[in-house]
Image (cartoon, coloured by chain):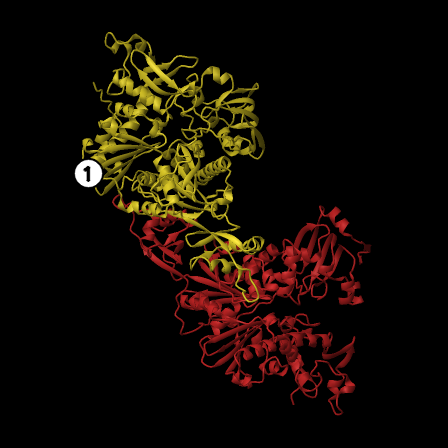
Chain colours: A yellow, B red
Amino acid sequence: MYINNRVIPVTDRQVMLMSNNPVNVAFLPAGKKINIPWGTTLIKAANEAGVEVDAVCGGKGTCGKCRAKVIEGAISEATRSEADRLSLEELKNGYVLLCQRRILGDVVLETLPSLARQESNGSTKGKIIDAALEVAPLISKTYHELSRPTIKDQVADLERILNRLPRETRAGVRLLSQVPDVLREAGYCVTSVVQEGELIALEKGNTVSEMYGIAVDVGTTSVAGYLVDLARGKVTASVSAANRQRAHGADVVSRITYIMEDDKGLAELQKLIAQTIDEIVGKLLQQSGVPAEHIYVLTLIGNTVMSHLLLGVTPVGVASAPFVPAFSGSVRGAVADLGIKSLPAYTRFVLLPNVAGYVGSDTIGVILATKIYNLPGTWLAIDIGTNGEVVLASGNRLLTCSTAAGPAFEGACISQGMRAEPGAISQVRMENDVEITVIGDAEPVGICGSGLIDAVSEMIRLGIVKSSGRIKSPEDLPPGFPAALIRRIKQNGNGNKFILAEGEREVSITQSDINELQLGKGAVRAGIEILLTELDLKPSDLDGILLAGAFGSNLRPASLKGIGMLPDVPLSSIKPVGNAAGTGAILALLSKRQMEVALSLPRRIEHVELSLHHGFQRAFARGLSFEVKK
Amino acid sequence: MYINNRVIPVTDRQVMLMSNNPVNVAFLPAGKKINIPWGTTLIKAANEAGVEVDAVCGGKGTCGKCRAKVIEGAISEATRSEADRLSLEELKNGYVLLCQRRILGDVVLETLPSLARQESNGSTKGKIIDAALEVAPLISKTYHELSRPTIKDQVADLERILNRLPRETRAGVRLLSQVPDVLREAGYCVTSVVQEGELIALEKGNTVSEMYGIAVDVGTTSVAGYLVDLARGKVTASVSAANRQRAHGADVVSRITYIMEDDKGLAELQKLIAQTIDEIVGKLLQQSGVPAEHIYVLTLIGNTVMSHLLLGVTPVGVASAPFVPAFSGSVRGAVADLGIKSLPAYTRFVLLPNVAGYVGSDTIGVILATKIYNLPGTWLAIDIGTNGEVVLASGNRLLTCSTAAGPAFEGACISQGMRAEPGAISQVRMENDVEITVIGDAEPVGICGSGLIDAVSEMIRLGIVKSSGRIKSPEDLPPGFPAALIRRIKQNGNGNKFILAEGEREVSITQSDINELQLGKGAVRAGIEILLTELDLKPSDLDGILLAGAFGSNLRPASLKGIGMLPDVPLSSIKPVGNAAGTGAILALLSKRQMEVALSLPRRIEHVELSLHHGFQRAFARGLSFEVKK
């Protein structure tokens, strides 16, 4: 590899010999710098410098997402993977895959913004979640005007407060040391903060109206946080950020693989998720102006693997038979136990319980928020993310399963996939030609999940894609087929591609993109069919399908039906419900009653382990097919 | 001051200018070394090096206990305090008071062993504390042979154990991460450790018989620790060590003064007591061979100020009206919260509740161990330490008070006072001459508390000391008074001294020694009288007096009566009961029932604040007098 005219080969032995010599790496445009041992990979340097990098494949060099430009400095030679993923032009101009190169001297890099963290303004902002909800949060604040001690009233400082609180209320050692000063400085007018029988904080004056919690939905790809005003029962701010664990793989399986291959992997992933939560907390506080000391409790939800990683507990048991997680119940503690640094030591967390297998507390959140556990009739709820969790409620029964939806729905593992950001094709219509909608009214540079599903659905409808998933060649199309569409089909390797946009940058859908999507939708569809079969039900028995997930809600129901992910039900009965998992976490934060329901749900749920289900292989094979409807 | 022919004056400004230049200080015979900023005081260097030094006066240069010899090196000039405390000969030979000198270059010092830490073999060792005691400790261990998970039994690792434990048992985040490995490595045969509804540890195999706790009696002067076998209900080892806080004053008042004068004082004292406990734990483990991971719980007792310092909570409220402590109830937590490093993170502590004022959980321990709360009749218990706590039990009433016994009973603040170590005069009889008993059959070098009280009691009995406390001059003694005694009386400053030993080193009792003892015994006697008066009782109503404290038990009841500390009761009704406070801590460790009694005692106790009691001044004045009985 040539950088600044230096060709430097590198061997593992050299790395060993030189690794005591630290080198400097600078990242543009972030402006972050780090001093790191010679021979470290660029991707590790980026992680340690806190520069966000997508690494969908977990650093194997296969996804090509961790592209960056070397401005100056010495790094190891280009690899075979780079030759496959980067053009000769790009290689000449200093483009590299961060996971493929080692640092051999001081380096300056420019990382690309395309997959940088996204933020949403959150549709829940300012909204009162549920008018009927009895706001009774997990913490309580009470204002006290205490009598001052006298020689006739020598009650100790702490007991002076505890005597005003429910009997058996305890206080921890850390708080104790602050009590004498707080009481005296506040003239004995103080506000107590009690959570589950423990006095966790004592504040000067009357602060009962300043009481906040944060609900955090820890997704495999992105993490959403909601700042909740517990005194007024409403969401004050919401943000999301990329899960920093993405540097070690796009899906839960690649993260488990990372843990199994690297002794420090578990600790590293735990640290990354704590940092992500710190980032979210920081943004929520900045947006709202609420000080960190008024955040008393977090509710946390996530799939089973995310729950394990958050607590620093190995999730490897979940990955192979007999599929046993390390824990499944709700876990409570202090946020400091999780390495979260942006909140006071007294802030507590409650991780909601998992269900079984990969079905975690995020599904508990969906069930809680949709009230599907209580609805009359027969309902399906689908939470589409990197995993796709399916819930079927009928009568008093509640079934769940987890499907390997894969990252295609989110635009990952798709050749030109990207998030729903400016430049992404988000909607596609086809009649005589293609009509696209691009986010931010920009030049199209890629395609996000909704655009992909729209496009494939239209291609199926028009017969451009066969039921097997194959993109037809121009000669296979019937006479009279619109020429504007035909000319968009080009050969591409062993198959064809379909060009959606021909501007400065061509955006197309390849055969392998369609196959990726096929695998994902096939898995979800198989899960749905199996749950229905378990209860002897048919799609026509369904009263409705609830589409959950901030992401799933952006997919058009007609297109989801079009690609055959959803069974054939009337379009009117398919209802997007937003990030129901996050809403569930908010409900559990706001109401003890809702928390109790959440804690009781796992006992009611019957979980179906698809990989062990005798009917799964057939259902999956059936689900792969794109039935062409006419 | 001349050291190695260098005379070096030093000013605060110089200290400021030079303090960035570190110097080396070595301590003999301990062989400890430290690198410390130029200008630091020698006593601070000793503390930081972990060399134990007595500093009864808190570094004011008035007690003369922190004497050491400079072998070589440069230090600041001798002070006025040293001129008062050291002879010219000593000064010439390099003797210094550590608190008076600053370090001006590399220094080698020899510290004196006389007041080095003592260790006791503990009379409780191997003894079953109370045959009637139901052993039901605060923790429980249970062995489980769990079924291995299968695809038909996918119960999570943690729940696999929790399902075998009482409902509602919780587990903390820290334990959780270990559960999967422990289960698999142990072939699903594990021992659970539960404390108060929390699973605190999980061990491989069957370890139910390995279950230990430590009871710690945190005294102002020394700290005692008892390793208790909770499976077998007996004490396995016991040790004591000097409370390292002594470097900042001998009594609670001088330590509070230190905190008020130095912003970092509270944190420093907290650290020193944690280090003392670490030292005790280390010795207990070494003596017994028990590994640290089998210590699950500590019970802690101490006076109110020690309790506060242990938790890092300011005790200044206790020191002045309205005498309000920061807390008085029992406090629980993890030993790690106290900065104790020698035990696992899961080890818990329970600090027993305080009573009121200076009367702390050590008195709760005395009440628990003596069962005075339950005895028929009328009983007095006195715990003689640096403070003297008095308990009066009569019928259903339980009264306490705290008296400023002062350090005289322990041999401190006495010109030649020392601990009960080799060379200490521990017993004194007088008839025609003086008969002394010296600990370790050595040459006498000083006097310990019991020797002092014996001697003064005898001097009162023979009329050498007047009821006012004054040592008579030879000419005031009646004709025929034994000449061997008369010649021991020598003039000493404004008063007289009485020579007990005339060997290589003269050991004598000075007038000020007697006055120190007088203040202490007067305070205790006043406390006794006031409690009796509160219940309209006379000394003759007492069924017995229980003398508690490892120290108090070594004082001869006849001599305590002789100096008038105890009221005039038959000698046979005065019973030494050993370190009852420590025994109480052991009982609370061994038995939940005893712990409940301990927790309930404060509500039953009526505390009398002597300093506010209208009758105290008169009672104290009366108590000062040595009534000469004939």
Residue B289 shows up from this direction: no
Mark 1 crowd level (few <14, some 14–19, many ≥20, 10 Å Cα): some
Say which amino acid is labelled 1.
Answer: Leu
Q: Residue at horizontal 69%, vertical 76%?
A: B515
| Closer to the camera in the image, B174 or A14 | B174
Q: Residue at horizontal 41%, vertical 21%?
A: A439
Vertical order, B456 against A245 (above or below)? below
Residue B521, position in %: x, y?
A: 63, 76
Screen quadrant of the N terminus of chain B: bottom right
Residue located farthest toward the bottom when viewing the structure as drawn: B480
Instruction: Tell whether B68 sits left or right of B6.
Output: left
Query: Label 1 belongs to which residue?
Result: A535
Vertical order, A231 against A19 (above or below)? below
Label 1 SS: loop
Residue A100, position in %: x, y?
A: 47, 26
Vertical order, A532 against A474 (above or below)? below
- Residue A464 quadrant: top left
Instruction: Tell whether A536 sits left or right of B203.
Output: left
Residue B143, position in %: x, y?
A: 34, 58
| Closer to the camera in the image, A118 or B222 | A118
Q: Residue at horizontal 66%, vertical 73%?
A: B423
Residue A160, position in %: x, y?
A: 50, 60
Residue A89 shows up from this direction: yes
- Residue B315 quadrant: bottom right
Q: Circle 1 marks a residue in which chain?
A: A
